[in-house]
Amino acid sequence: MVTEIKIADTAALPEAARQLIGLMGDRTVLTFEGEMGAGKTTFINALCRELGVESDLTGSPSFAIANEYRSDTTAELIYHFDLYRLESLEEALDLGFEDYLDCGALCLIEWPGLVDDLLPDDTIRCRITVADDGSRTLTADVPE
């Protein structure tokens, strides 16, 4: 099932995040693609806030590759990956990427191209596109 979520501006991010949460069900792996500056990290920050991450600072894990957050409401772990700097699948495996996918925690992955073959079949694949007016559309491909 493919769903489009319109994001007019940053004020619309919380509602857009809630809409995506409503599509997740039991799925724990979500990927985010889009051009540089499309708003992947910004959307993930809003998603984490809606999932109850208040005390942890969320931001791009570009240099760390992975950030770990904990929901203040459910105490569940959330992993945020930015794989832009990885040059090979071997690097992801060396980081223990498969262990993260198997741990049951929510995994939010920016730039998932290199690890695509490792992702579970029920991965929700999101793409953010930017319109001429600066609004965004998040297209979520949710496996049935």
Image (cartoon, helix red, strand yellow):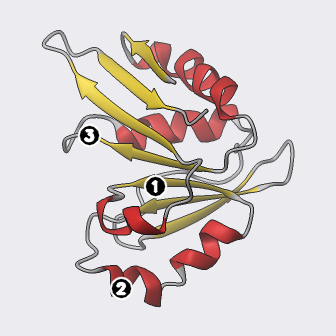
Name the N-terminal-most of marks 2 and 1. Answer: 2
Q: Which residue is mark 3?
A: 34
Q: Are marks 1 and 3 in contact (CB under 8 Å)?
A: no
Q: Position of residue 108 (x, y in %)?
A: 53, 52
Q: Residue at x 40, y 15 (%)?
A: 7
The kind of residue tagged 1 is: Ile
Residue drawn at point x = 54 percent, y = 84 percent: 96
Residue farthest along the left direction in this orientation = 132
Residue type highlighted by circle 3: Gly
Residue 114 in percent (x, y) is at 31, 68
Q: How far separated are the C-alphas under marks 1 and 3?
A: 12 Å
Residue at image coords 61%, 67%? 101
- Residue placed most toward the observer, 122 or 51: 122
**Left or right of 130: which side holds 119?**
right
- Residue found at x 62% / y 41%: 48
Give the quarter of the image for residue 40. Answer: top left
Instruction: Estimate the spatial distance between the alpha carbons at disc 2 and disc 3, rounded to whole Å.
Output: 22 Å
